[in-house]
Image (cartoon, rainbow, N blue to C red):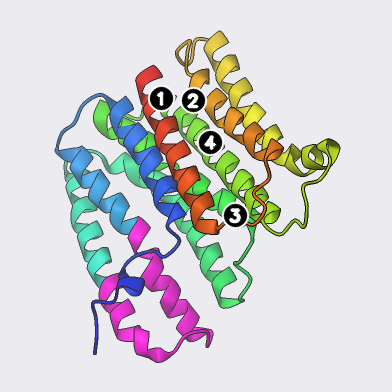
Amino acid sequence: MRLFRRHVALPQDHGSWAFFLGPLIVGLFTGGRWHTSAIYLTVAAGCGFLVRQPIGLMVKVAAGRRGRDVLPAAIFWTALYGAVAALHVTGLVMRGFGYLLVLAVPGMLVFCWYLLLLYRRSERRNWMMEILATGAVALVAPAGMWAGRGAPDPLGWWLWLLMWQQSATGIVYVYLRLAQRSWKRVPTGNGRLSAGMPSLTVAVAGLVLTLVLWQFGVVSRWLWVPYLWQMVEVIRGVRRPALGAKPVAIGVRQLLVKVVFVALFIALW
């Protein structure tokens, strides 16, 4: 019986790591102070992120999509992640950070929907589910801020919305790039613009949002810069379709875009 199976213990959709780590890092930095509660939060949130892989496999076994040979390993990793998460959540509650648990509720609801889709074999290419899932994951941003500041600062909700918007832009854009792979030839300018309009719309919305929040004194004057960076990337992708590109190459480029975005966001916050 092999319990230490990588595909059971770790998520195989590598892009999901960026959607989790990006908001978490931003939240911790905007929190301003690093202490034990930040460590508790990081470990608990990390376990919550990781546990979806073995639980998902158990659902696939129940649906007849996977063999029962992975079941012992899936149960082992679910129990391990759950125990470690429970230990660190207890630490947060004992230190007076129990209010952070409210942020976990939307995540659990979205996760239950995801498991239902897994059971019904309808989770693939479900962009609505993916956008909602990144919104739930982005809640680690206000959690990190509140853990650092020691109180549920209302500014955390704007931080969550900004992180969710960036992740949603990334998802819509990746769908565009993957669709471009199957194009037989480069369309005309109007054809490329029509196909890229959803990505462009979401990217522009992020830029406009930061400018409006700046005008109302919610965020810093230059926070629009990382959103401009992302919009420039989307414009590039619309103008230069990814005909025949490998999914790995698309994923690596999006990871680099995300890293630069997070660095700019933290520096200009």
Q: Is residue 68 magenta?
A: yes
Residue 207 in which image quadrant: top right
Q: Which mark is residue 166?
A: 4
Residue type of the residue flagged with mark 3: Ala
Residue 269: give x, y in percent of width and height: 39, 19
State the CA–CA distance, disc 4 to disc 3. Answer: 23 Å
Furthest residue toward left = 36
Instruction: Give the mark nearer the N terminus: 4 vs 3.
Output: 4
From the image, tell me which residue sits under label 2: 226
Residue 158: give x, y in percent of width and height: 49, 27
257 left or right of 69? right
| Callout 1: SS | helix
Residue type of the residue flagged with mark 2: Pro
- State the residue in front, 40 or 125: 125
Q: Residues within 10 Å of mark 1 (few under 14, many from 20)?
A: some
Name the magenta segment's main secondary structure: helix
Residue type of the residue flagged with mark 1: Leu
From the image, tell me which residue sits under label 3: 245
| Callout 2: SS | helix
- State the residue in front, 67 or 90: 67
Q: Which mark is residue 264?
A: 1
State the CA–CA distance, disc 3 to disc 2. Answer: 26 Å
Residue 213: give x, y in percent of width and height: 55, 17
Residue 255 in which image quadrant: top left
| Callout 3: SS | loop
Q: Which residues are magenta?
A: 49-78
Q: Residues within 10 Å of mark 2 (few under 14, many from 20)?
A: many
State the CA–CA distance, disc 3 to disc 1. Answer: 28 Å
- State the residue in front, 68 or 101: 68
